[in-house]
Image: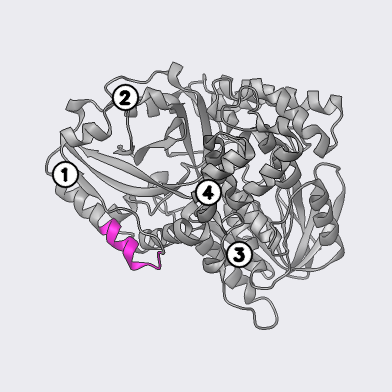
Amino acid sequence: MTAARMGPDERAEALAHMADNELDVLVVGGGIVGAGVALDAVSRGLSVGLIEARDFAAGTSSRSSKLIHGGLRYLEQLDFELVREALTERGLLLGRLAPHLVRPVPFLFPFQKHWERGYIGAGVTLYDILALTGRSTRGLPAHRHLSRSGALRVFPALRRDAFAGAIQYWDAQVDDARYVLMVLRTAATYGARIASRAQAVGFLREGEHVTGARVQDLETGHEIDVRAQQVVNAAGVWTDDIQEMVGGRGQIHVSASKGIHLVVPRDRIQASSGMILRTEKSVLFVIPWGRHWIIGTTDTPWNLDKAHPAASRADIDYVLDHINAVLRVPLTRDDVEGVYAGLRPLLSGESDETSKLSREHTVAHPVPGLVLIAGGKYTTYRVMAKDAVDAVVHGLDGKIPESVTDRVPLVGADGFAALWNQRHTIARDAGLHVSRVVHLLRRYGSLIDDLLELMRERPDLKEPVTGSGDYLRAEIVYAATSEGARHLDDVLSRRTRISFETWDRGIAAAEEAAELIAEPLGWNEEQIKREVEYYRKRIEAERAAQEQENDHEADAVQHGAPDIVPEATPKLPQVKS
């Protein structure tokens, strides 16, 4: 089956189809949960549309720790079922659903007191056992105990006096935004109609029943009515606001927790493994990420602008202070290449501390015809989507098949193993260094053929974008023609990760990238300049925010960046009779 393209023409066709046809399911929200719902529903034979007010994965789903994991810390909270469920999903993703996108990664867990070896060791042993109890199709190496000297051989950057010993265990990682996109393309391949920059500005209703949504195309300002038998709202941190607008019955309470991550060059920390550290509030990860390390995260309440969470100087110093407590050569702010901040949607409990709120998910029917899904964690998105569509099924006539997404590989997965084994041959035939082919295989899997074809047609696309690190010109063009990118920021921040993997946060790459996507997106010179200027101002605002002492000051500064399309923050849907 040929993977569906998600270019400008396909977006226009999707909106036209949604305007002219009643859907079985309309999904509002293009993050990982909304994408998962669309794929689950369409693979059961339902007609599906999905709209996203900004870019796909523009919120939480592009700003995570980029881990596929069971949540080792939840064992301490005795949440064994959540951990087992997540580990089962980890195994499915590694082995069957997305082996091209999800990769194993080792973590060192150092401890300060010798008695902790037994306590931590028991937890990690249980972690490994729970991974074997699910339907995992691929196991990871078992954990191993290390002496202080053994740990230093794995992680020489550690201060010898900062720990007494360590345990090494394995989890997995993923480019979160790319994964969302691949789920969406898989859903589109099976027939889902998908459009970004399309915002639900009101719900359609017949009496008590929600029958669809009024949708505004933010690129043109045009509005259409999209009718659907069931609407699924996967709005994440906006769940409470939207719920209130439709009556608030069967309420779900969601709190937003801000997490920030720092990106530093790989040579700043000498190690061959990731690391996890316990903090007074949660845990801190040091995660290998290509030529970089990702270090995070924080876990603090956020009640300000949900569309643009800002990292403050206090956030950055908090992360640096905690990692420097164990490093032989401390990191400074000058070592930080990139910073990104995201919000987690947590189901509220009785505690005011976000680290103690639940990561479990829930599904609710606030009014007939509308399903809300909230909470959860990235790793268990497929289970969340299944539960949401199960709830949808109750509102549809006729017998609907059970979920099959545990057996539906994402686009790019089929044939990946063979192509990986042939990477040297592919590199020779394409005239590329094998490292370039490895980079492409890990981002596109078997869809690498699309990129290679582009480069055969235009040999200039084999070259990296100036100032982008590892990203090829072909990837920039492909983002616009096939991956739903509508603006320069979509390409630099989510289709690639240039915005946080380069010292200048993508400024040097911006003009060249804009010129590459201008033709497929139909831009003139004025629009190219506008896109580059917008991107520069957004980066300037983010940098200025990161110099502010607290959240309120950082939030105020970050509001200085303009938005590339008319909307600034998602408007709350109004009820339309």
Q: Which quadrant of the view contains residue 440?
A: top right
Disc 3 to disc 4: CB gap under 8 Å? no
Q: Is residue 356 left or right of residue 61?
A: left
How far is mark 2 from mark 4, CA to CA? 42 Å
Asked whether residue 500 is in view, the answer is yes
- Helix, strand or loop for disc 4: loop
How far is mark 1 from mark 4, CA to CA? 45 Å
Amino acid type of the residue that numbered disc 3 sits on in the rendered structure: Arg
Amino acid type of the residue that numbered disc 1 sits on in the rendered structure: Glu
Q: Which residues are magenta?
A: 126-136
Badge 4 is on which residue? 422
Disc 1 to disc 3: CB gap under 8 Å? no
Badge 3 is on which residue? 249
- Helix, strand or loop for disc 3: loop
Q: Is residue 91 left or right of residue 327?
A: right
Disc 2 to disc 1: CB gap under 8 Å? no
Q: Main secondary structure of the magenta part?
A: helix
Name the residue furthest bottom: 398
State the image coordinates of residue 156 (x, y, percent, origin top left): 26, 28
Badge 2 is on which residue? 324
Disc sitting over residue 116 in the figure? 1
**Along the polypeptide, which appears first: circle 2 or circle 1?**
1
